[in-house]
Image (spheres, rainbow, N blue to C red):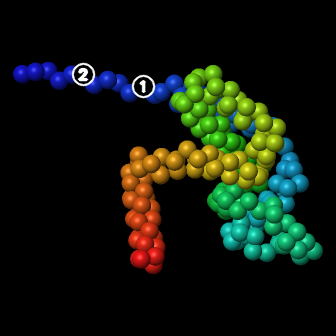
Amino acid sequence: MSESAPKKAYTPAPSAFVGAILGVATAAVYLIGSGRAFGYDAAVTFANFVATPSMLDAFAVHSQQPTIPLFGIAGNDHVLVSLLSHLIYSTTGSRWEVVYRVIPALAAAGTVGVTAAVLVNRFGLTAGTCAGVFVATNPMFVVNSRDLRGYSLGVLCAVLATVLLPRTGTGRSRWGRPLLHGTRSRRARRLGRRASFTN
């Protein structure tokens, strides 16, 4: 009776280690001093779209301050981060600034980690690490990721879409094949109709 070969233990790729380390470091550094008062834009967001009785206020349905028209402050409503923050407020009732800076900081950490991991895997350790550090130390990214703003969450979604959608389009994922097949089928139907009109 032949003995089965021992299974090899799973070892994460170096790119995953680099991404995780840079992501954790980013979150830890960004959360330093997170108990400070909100900046002007974050304070407007918190007062009008987060710390309110109704969760619908996260969608900027009306202003909490009658003297300020909604169109004057609606630009401060980053809906996804307002909605997630409103869930925290509705659940805990907390007004502690640290709690509401966690989501932007984690989104920034995810952005840095994913960017570094993907580029380490593609271009090597030095290039990928430098890219992650570059993103993490970008002044505008730092400022907007350390307050109650939705920019880092938007950047994270953009990075994830950039990484995942090309794979979907090539049919290398289980969702990609139906999508690619449907695209080809629609293109073939359009070409068929065009040919019938020209004949």
**Side of 164 where 43 appears, left or right:** right
- 81 relative position to 68: left or right: left
Q: Is residue 162 visible?
A: yes
Q: Look at 85% across and 56% down and name the residue there.
A: 41
Discs 1, 2 touching: Cβ within 8 Å: no
Q: Residue at x 69, y 71 (%)?
A: 56
Q: Is residue 78 left or right of residue 117?
A: right
Q: Which residue is mark 1?
A: 11
Q: Which mark is residue 6?
A: 2
The answer to whether any part of residue 35 appears in the image is: no
User: Foreground residue, 156 or 58?
Assistant: 156
* Sequence-wise first label, 1 or 2: 2
Q: Nearer the viewer, residue 169 or 192?
A: 192
Q: Is residue 59 above or below residue 11?
A: below
x and y percentages locating residue 144 in the rendered image: 79, 46
Identify residue type, mark 1: Thr
Residue 110: percent from left, percent from top = 62, 41
Image quarter of the C terminus: bottom left
Measuring from the top left, give residue 164's x and y in whole percent: 52, 47
Q: Give the secondary structure at mark 2.
A: loop
Q: Is residue 46 above or below residue 136?
A: below
* Cα separation between marks 1 and 2: 15 Å
Residue occupying image coordinates x 86% and y 47%:
37
Label 1 element class: loop
